[in-house]
Image (spheres, helix red, strand yellow):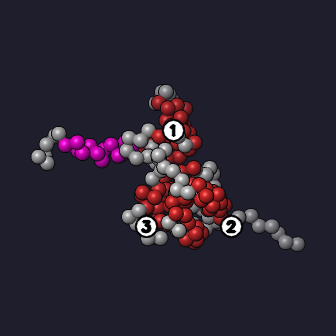
Amino acid sequence: PLCSNNNPYASFGATLARDEEQNLWSTPHDVTHTEADDDRVLYNMIVGRSQLDKDSEEWQKLNYDIYTLRQTRKEVRSRWKHILEDLGFQKEADSLLSVTKLSIISDSQNMGKARDILLKLSEETNIFPTSWQLSERYLFVVDRLIALDAADEFFKMASVVYPKRASVERVDEK
């Protein structure tokens, strides 16, 4: 029966929410969030916070840092998803952005091109915040875009939607 308490899917939404809280990038119950450097940093911050007294200043600072990192990661993911959807990948955007330790590079010959595009995205657009260290997971996403022959279009769209802002500094000409 649909109303039974034995429904194995009843808490699925709550489980997804908990997984999202712990790890923005993994699939439900995927414990690989410590595999990538940026995931390891977040994990270590969460572990460190759990060992502190909740009323302490250190706990509050660490809690703020964790929140800030998660918000930054959500913002970056949202930017990528926005561009993917604008390129026509409305239904595929989430799966294109899903990266776990089981993810593989589709063609090793694309690795160099994927790195170049990712570096170009970081240098010539604002798709990543200025303080962002390039995440390996977006290398997998760019590889997928190369396989779909959409990497160049993605870069062009990112350049338009998230252009690099010119420096505010001016040099007085004499």
Q: CA distance from mark 2 to mark 3?
A: 30 Å
Quadrant that contains the C terminus: bottom right
Horizontally, is 61 left or right of 31 in the view?
right
Mark closer to the chain start, 2 or 3: 3
The three-letter code of the residue at mark 1 reads: Thr
User: Which residue position is annotated with label 3?
Assistant: 89
Q: Residues within 10 Å of mark 1 (few under 14, many from 20)?
A: some
Does 11 appear in magenta? Answer: yes
Task: Write down the quadrant of residue 37 in the picture.
Answer: top right
Residue interval drawn in magenta: 7-19
- Residue at image position (49%, 47%) is 70
**Magenta stretch: helix, strand or loop mostly:** helix
Q: Is residue 44 above or below residue 167?
A: above
Residue at the spot 11% in from the left edge and 46% down from the top edge = 1
Residue annotated with mark 2? 166
Say what secondary structure mark 3 lies in. loop
Amino acid at the residue labelled 3: Phe
Q: Which element type, helix, strand or loop, lies under badge 2?
A: loop
Q: Nearer the viewer, mark 2 or mark 3?
A: 3
Name the residue type under label 2: Ala
Q: Which residue is mark 1?
A: 34
Which of pointers 3 and 1 lies earlier in the amino acid sequence? 1
Q: Is 145 inside the magenta-drawn segment? A: no
Q: Residue 103: image x %, image y %?
A: 48, 49
Tell me the distance, in whole angstroms, between the alpha carbons under discs 1 and 2. 36 Å
- Which residue is nearer to you in this view: 142 or 63? 142
